Image (cartoon, coloured by chain):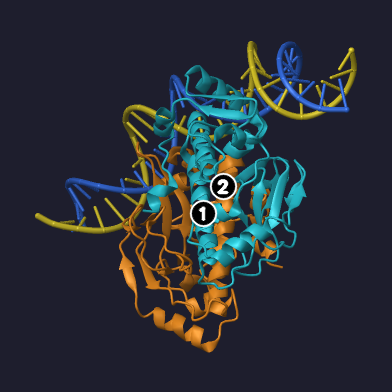
Chain colours: A cyan, B orange, C yellow, D blue
Amino acid sequence: MVNGNLAFGQRVGLASRFSQLAPLDPVELRALEDAETALRTVGAHREIFEEGRPVAPPSIVVSGWAARSRVFADGRRQILGLLLPGDLIGSWRHRQPRAATGTLALTEVTLCPAPRPASPDGALAEAYARSAALDEFYLYRQIARLGRLSARERVADLLLEVRERLAVVGLASPDRFPLRMTQELLADTLGLTSVHVNRTLQSLRRDGLLDLAGGIAYLKNIDVLTRLADHRSPELYEG
Amino acid sequence: MVNGNLAFGQRVGLASRFSQLAPLDPVELRALEDAETALRTVGAHREIFEEGRPVAPPSIVVSGWAARSRVFADGRRQILGLLLPGDLIGSWRHRQPRAATGTLALTEVTLCPAPRPASPDGALAEAYARSAALDEFYLYRQIARLGRLSARERVADLLLEVRERLAVVGLASPDRFPLRMTQELLADTLGLTSVHVNRTLQSLRRDGLLDLAGGIAYLKNIDVLTRLADHRSPELYEG
DNA sequence: CGACAAGTTGATGTTACTCAAAAGTGGTGG
DNA sequence: CCACCACTTTTGAGTAACATCAACTTGTCG
């Protein structure tokens, strides 16, 4: 499975992704497959949604990487969370007239409109709700990472998280996956400077824990990395 | 309005709080008022929900302060978000078997069961959805705060946020409100040490920007504080 | 080849942490 | 009412982690 899937623009089967979250019926599966034919493409480094602008209907990331971000008046930037293939952006649950965060395409991104659940009690609605709960889980993790982990620990924790999220959609092998972020972007995600990210990566590399090259991350010692960051997977909470 | 409402254990009228989020009908208003008669009390410093435990049905905070927290294996703690009177904990949207975060009572807290919306399209469901969207907004803000603000800026930003959230439920006057957190707890919220929080507060006090005494926060110069933290209110996104 | 973005390095500065202890605060029981 | 206790706040001195600034190198793509 691995090599083909490590290709960057790799698409994700939405039907299989959301089937993992709830037992979709054939109509719902069909709706997801149909949605994938109405793609919208956004070039790398462009804004998908702008902060404060009226919100578009919900979409699903089909391929590519995006991120929610906040830019301060003086130019400081913080990546609030990553949006990876299979992730749902937005919801139907209420009118949210304006976007509370900006959304940025890190690579070329393709999106499709998220099919509207036929019934609020159906499996598709349930899958969307679980997807939203996962998003929330990752927001909490981002907060703990920024608040209480050192630079080394932050890097380890983030890479483990990305691996885990890409693995769910079949885009990561156990120890390697594409990492479509410059060190500067990693820095804005981790609340560090790019210089410090660079030095931290070197240190982790020297210790034989991981390697980053050519946009591919190799996690060489997942056990040590996991302990380093006290990393806990979301499946722990699904049992 | 002010002085009585600054009392710590002050209860909040749930009907009025959720009416601000969506135009509730009389039946829904009644349901909220009824809910407030079935109170559950949790003593200060006790866990309301434990991380990893099965999740209780949704509740609403009627009085007191609580917080979601994550404790690392080595004892480091991060407060992920505050839960203030009028806040909704949990949702019906899906079965979430286990709590992804611990929930801690900072003061004595009273909770009531959240009435279940009769219809998923009704105003009560809409109010809950808006409440969830606000929660999400505050999570993003916590991330930006931890990732990119200095200690002074973090303190300013957090206090402005608490003021804003308490004001919505009538528990804050324009420039003062109860702050039921020790400096140690502030530190765990802001990703700092309590020693540094202490020094930062002294510095802000010296500059005449704010004062903290006897569990009451006074914001003496909201304009400067707002600019200091580039603070934006959620109403900006509601228009 | 040349240009531009990304990654790397060194020197130095600053912010926040650590450790340790003292001083203040509030509640409790004798 | 006082003595005591636990908790919180405050202070000082020394240190570690991360930021800043500026230059240099490498890689990529036309």
Q: Is residue B163 left or right of residue B79?
A: right
Please report, as a chain letter, where disc 1 is located.
Answer: A
Q: How many C-alpha atoms fall within 10 Å of the one at disc 2: few (<14), some, or many (≥20)?
A: many
Q: Is residue B66 left or right of residue C3?
A: left
Q: Residue B120, located in which quarter of the rendered image?
A: bottom right
The one of A157 and A117 positioned closer to us in this rendering: A117
| Residue type of the residue flagged with mark 1 | Glu
Q: CA distance from mark 2 to mark 1?
A: 12 Å
Residue to which mark 2 is pinned: B143
The one of A174 and B140 positioned closer to us in this rendering: A174
| Residue type of the residue flagged with mark 2 | Ile
The answer to whether mark 2 and mark 1 are in CB contact below 8 A is: no
Residue to which mark 1 is pinned: A136
The one of A229 and B42 positioned closer to us in this rendering: A229
Q: Residue B146, located in which quarter of the rendered image?
A: top right
Q: How many marks?
A: 2
- The image shows residue C1, relative to residue A149, as above or below, that is above
Please report, as a chain letter, where disc 2 is located.
Answer: B
Q: Is residue D16 left or right of residue C13?
A: left
* Residue at position x 51%, y 17% in the image: A206
The one of B91 and B86 positioned closer to us in this rendering: B91
Between marks 2 and 1 in the image, the one whose residue lies nearer the viewer: 1
- The image shows residue B25, relative to residue A164, as above or below, that is below
- The image shows residue B138, relative to residue B15, as above or below, that is above
